[in-house]
Image (cartoon, rainbow, N blue to C red):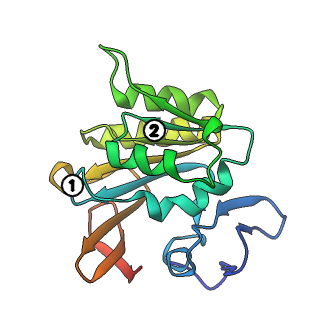
Amino acid sequence: MKTANQLHHVNAWESTTASGSSLVTSTGSAVLDELLPGGGWPRSGLVEVILPDAYSEAMSVLMPALVRISQQRRWIAMVNPTWPARSQLFTESAVRHERVLQVNPHPGRSALWTAESLLQAGECSVVMAWPNCRTELMGKRLEKAAAHGKALGILFSYEGLQTQPSGVALRIRLECGREGRAVYLLNGRGETLAGEAL
C-alpha cells in the first residue's frame, strides 16, 4: 500500500521521483492508479494479472497505457495471446499496430522462455505473456529479465493455475460479473490487500 511520502498524480500520465526520473505509467484510471503501488503500471518489472479464465476480457484495463506506449520507439509484444486479447489490441484504432508483435513460440520453446528472451533483449517496452502454467521460479526469472531489459512484463494467469507463494512482486486479480468489474491487489501468498470497483 502507499506510504505518506509516495505521490499520486491523478491528472498526469507519468509519476516521477523528485529527481525527475519516470517510474510508472498511469493506467488511465484514477481508481486503478490509486490502488497500485507507485500510482500506475511500473515501467520496468513484472505484473501478474490473475483472471477467472482464458475468456475473461482484461485488455481494457491495460489499453490506455498500451495506446500511449505504442507511440514510443520500442515494441509491444504478445506471447501466445488468447484470441480475445489479440483481437482487442489489433482492433483498437488508437494503438500503433506497426509497433505490436505477436510471437507464437516454436515447437520445443515455451512461452515463458520466449517472454524471458524478449524482456531481456531490451527492444520491447511491454511483453505480455499467456503461458498456461505457473511456477514461483518463473516469476523470479521474468522479473530479472524485465529489469535487465528495462521493460514491463505482464503475465496473465488463471485462478485454477495459481501456485502459492508467487515470486511476482505486483499481483492483481480481475473479477468480472453482472454488476461490473473489480480489481484486487494481492500479496505473494495470494491474500487480498485492497480492492476497487472499476
Which of the two marks, 2 or 1, is nearer to us in this view?
A: 1
Position of residue 145 relative to residue 68, above or below, is above
Position of residue 155 relative to residue 78, above or below, is below
Position of residue 46 relative to residue 114, above or below, is below
Q: At 27% from the left edge and 71% from the top edge, which residue is drawn?
A: 176
Q: Secondary structure at mark 2?
A: helix
Taking the image as shown, residue 166 lies to the left or right of residue 159, namely: right
Numbered label attached to residue 53: 1
Taking the image as shown, residue 142 lies to the left or right of residue 95, namely: left
Taking the image as shown, residue 12 lies to the left or right of residue 182, namely: right
Count of number-bearing discs = 2
Q: Residues within 10 Å of mark 2 (few under 14, many from 20)?
A: many
The kind of residue tagged 2 is Leu
Numbered label attached to residue 198: none
The kind of residue tagged 1 is Asp
Image spot of residue 62 (x, y percent)? 50, 59
Based on the displayed image, in which of its 4 quarters is residue 7 positioned?
A: bottom right
Q: Which residue is mark 2?
A: 142
Q: Which of the two residues, 71 or 157, is positioned nearer the viewer here? A: 71
Image spot of residue 59 (x, y percent)? 43, 57
Q: CA distance from mark 2 to mark 1?
A: 22 Å
